[in-house]
Image: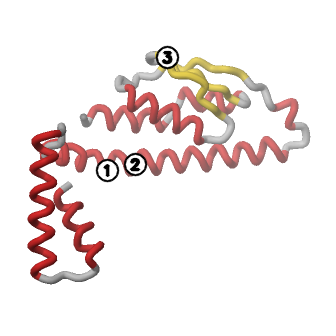
Amino acid sequence: MPILLFALWLVFNERITIDVVIVGLIGVAIITAFLAKYSDWSIKKDVQFAGKIPSFIVFILALIAEVIKANVHMIKLVLSKNPDSLIKPRIVAHKTNLKTQTGRVALANSITLTPGTVTVDVVDDIVYVHAIDDMAKDGLGENALERELENMERSL
């Protein structure tokens, strides 16, 4: 975080001179000392966070792929000759292996982002999802997003 704060300081100042650098270093040192003393921030947590960045990028790419797949499926569903016969909405209870509340919320929001599914509720390790058809329901079982979130949880 100190590096990010210093980089933002330089960007906001639009120039790099010795006085800007010195004032920036002093300001960052004060903010960093304050955060270390009065919050739960530490350099160790920054290093742990930096280690999660590759997992987070993989998760975002998996989310984009799932959204594209779901969009293509919804287009096929809507443009089919008789979409009413294919649409079979239902509420599905999906048991997740995610341990943290943050992971479960991220999964629930990711499911809601994919067309054809909406997360209705999350109770403990069960995610209740409204699925528009069988393919949306079956997609919950082979959830790449959940695997990536589990990888991120393991790296905690």
Taking the spot 61% from the left edge, 25% from the top edge, the residue there is 120
Q: CA distance from mark 2 to mark 1?
A: 6 Å
Check disc 1 and report the residue beneath it: 54
Crowd rating for badge 3 (residues with CA inside 10 Å; few <14, some 14–19, many 20+): few
Please tell me whether residue 81 is drawn above or below residue 123 in the rendered image.
Answer: below
Query: In the displayed structure, would residue 101 be above or below residue 83?
Result: above
Identified at 30% across, 50% down, the residue is 53
| Marked residue nearer the N-terminal end (1 or 3) | 1
Q: In the picture, which quadrant includes the C terminus?
A: top left
Q: Give me the residue at 47% from left, 38% from top.
A: 145
Q: Position of residue 99 (x, y in %)?
A: 35, 23
Residue 32 in the image: state x and y as whole percent. Answer: 13, 52
Circle 1 Cα neighbour tier, 10 Å, few/some/many (<14 / 14–19 / ≥20):
few
Give amino acid for label 3.
Val
- Residue furthest out toward the right: 81
Distance, label 1 to label 3, CA atoms, is: 29 Å
Tag 1: residue type? Pro
Q: CA distance from mark 3 to mark 2?
A: 27 Å
The residue that mark 3 highlights is: 123
* Residue named by callout 2: 58
Is 53 situated left or right of 87 in this image?
left
